[in-house]
Amino acid sequence: MEVCFKEYGGAMGPGKFSNAKKVSKGKKEDGGPRGFSHACHEYHKLTGAGKELPADFAVGIGKPLPFGASEVEGGINFAVFSRHAQKVWLELFDAPEDEKAFASIELDPKGHRTGDIWHVWIRGIGNGQIYAFRVDGPYQPEEGHRFNRHKLLLDPYAHALVGTRNWDFKLAIGAQLYAAELDIFCSTENNARHMAKCLLADTRFDWQGDRPLKHSWSDTILYETHVRGLTIHPSSAAKNPGTFLGIVEKIPYFKKLGITAIELMPVQEFNENELDRLNPITGERLRNFWGYNTVSFFAPKESYSSGRELGCQVTEFKTMVRELHRAGIEVILDIVLNHTAEGDERGPTLNFRGMENSIYYMLRSNRRLYRNYSGCGNSLNCNHPVVRGYILDCLRHWVIEMHVDGFRFDLATVLGRDLNGDILPNPPILERIAEDPLLRDVKLIAEAWDAGGAYQVGSFPGQRWSEWNGHYRDDVRRFWRGDPGMIGALASRICGSADLYQRTGKHPLNSINFITCHDGFTLNDLVSYKLKHNEANGEENLDGEDENFSDNYGVEGETTDPAIESLRIRQIKNMLATLFISRGVPMILGGDEFRRTQKGNNNAYCQDNEVSWFDWTLLSRNRQIFRFTREMIHFRKRHKVLAAEKFYTADDIVWFGPDGKVPEWEGDGRTLGCMVNPMKGEADESKQALCILFNAEETAKVFTLPSPPPGRFWHRFVDTSKSYPHDIRTVGKEKIMKEQGIYPLQARSMVILIAE
């Protein structure tokens, strides 16, 4: 390749291009865009790549739009952005592992450049073609430029990658410099053999009339899970374990549980082999399991496909979405648009850095270095106009071409920072996303904080944005752990967190309520461990949050003590019941409904093993937790008052203490009760008043009950202190209480009564 670049200038050198230029004055030839040439035959002889080019192979000037690779006038048009590039080559490969391209086309800026867009049209290739780019320009880190023509670059708009299953960044960077404490971009090693490459994927698909479901936020119940982790364990009995089609196999389970949306941890292409640490316990190499280090934002993950044919991940992802929609389940993607897998100045050159480093990333005043608000080495310069356009194109692609229903934006506060890292009052990209005509119906969820110290829960810019409510998680955990003085915070969270959202003109449905998520303890571990146990991560247990507001209730980890087990089960039910009676949008962590455990690891991002995999044998062993979760979901769906889009008024909900009087909000109490009045205009089954009692004390409390509406009586739906199957009734079959005036509420338990 070196000979080609230096001596011959590629297939479309100046002399050859001048011939093509004459054609460009007039008409098209052979159906291609103006300005095509057959000069690649001569180039093929010079490089000796060993492949006969197709007889109809031709090269044309191409068009600057659309970005990426697309079918245009009987050929394929390629277009990439680079403002400071001096040369660009498109390289075509036969196989993912090839080191040498069978054709390398140099794009002459005199014809193949429009503004900052480099473009070329190729005839004689089509679906299944493997390609990549090389870009040359100034290597001036002090100015923010890090061009290196020796490094193969991925198309930022590629719809699929190949060669990712055994990808190793160490080899892609250049092994001899990988550990060096210097700029590794000075490497002149050709990394093509070790790099993943782009694929012209077949985009044809039979959607069978699929249309967006458009569930309202008030009807939404989110289930967060991981594509591989859900079904890779042998106990899943999946025919296609660890894949998009494995998700499809679990649809009957999701329907039985009652969720309405599945929130998938990152499915955009990432490199699970990027870590070079070993598990100090087992000696096995650790892997990037979670995927929060995106390489290619338009491309679904190759290893999440069940087939081996190139590009099948695109078809299988679409199949998953179509079948979930058929079952009434929306698809939300966790998307990581705050940083990329290129890391800091010592990371690999994969795409953005090698094409236009100074624009795609936030750089420090010493422009050799990167601003790092993600905790992962770099931060995307999201509010630069070019990067804004890229982000919008990416989101539109997943909505229009892949039919997803919404996005959860990881560390979304990064998207609100300017070039210097300062928080903007009205970030352009956030407003553009919210107001984009093609994205108006999709769900937008922000993780409203970042690793730079910003925390915007309740104040994230824009009325359309819902937010992961970290206050909800912490306050519910603390109340049920028995921390004193938490009844006021609990009441606020149950009512939709008006203290956070009302002042900014938002509503309860802007709050995504959760007690656990992928980041932290599972619900089972929350009641089984006081301390994190991340030793297997190889970071000396220094990673992960130290304060989890958890308890083990006497024994750290698993136990056979029946008293401790009984209390743990009760606490799990208490938190699940609290979640589903709270205004806002409930989200459960996948597997919590049957006590999935990570053995106390609260940061299992690198554990692609049984620590993270769903052990489906737990479902039969913890059937009562699954039943409890399912019935609480059905209960919430029936009682629309719990999911209303507005905040409660004083007439809607009345709070009281055990004595039936106004609670002592400023005290250290751990008990609380409320009566929720039915909403006007709802169906008959939703007009039932509710009485909900909470006791986080270590002793029982007798509650004086409010009077039910005239002609009605209190029926018990839930009492978490009672053993299975008396802990929860089937919706519509609640048990009438003999004593209507008082309720003896056991220690650390919760009761839900219905007036019928």
Image (cartoon, rainbow, N blue to C red):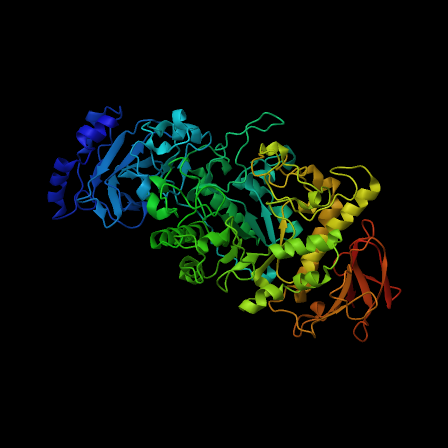
Q: Position of residue 211 (x, y in %)?
A: 48, 56
- Is the residue 415 above or below the residue 30 in the image? below
- Count of marks, rendered view: 0
Seen from the viewer's position, the closer of residues 52 and 536 is 536
696 vs 221, left or right, is right
Quadrant of res 504: bottom right
Decide if residue 650 is in sight here.
Answer: yes
Residue at image position (43%, 31%) is 169
Q: Position of residue 367 (x, y in %)?
A: 35, 44
Seen from the viewer's position, the closer of residues 68 and 494 is 494
Decide if residue 693 is in sight here.
Answer: no
Seen from the viewer's position, the closer of residues 545 and 9 is 545
- Is the residue 395 above or below the residue 437 in the image? above
312 vs 448, left or right, is left
Residue at image position (32%, 41%) is 142
For the N terminus, the image quarter is: top left
Q: Position of residue 660 (x, y in %)?
A: 82, 69
For the C terminus, the image quarter is: bottom right
- Is the residue 187 above or below the residue 215 in the image? above
Q: Residue furthest right?
A: 738
Seen from the viewer's position, the closer of residues 682 and 356 is 356
Quadrant of res 632: bottom right
Q: Position of residue 584 (x, y in %)?
A: 62, 61
Quadrant of res 622: top right
60 vs 356, left or right, is left
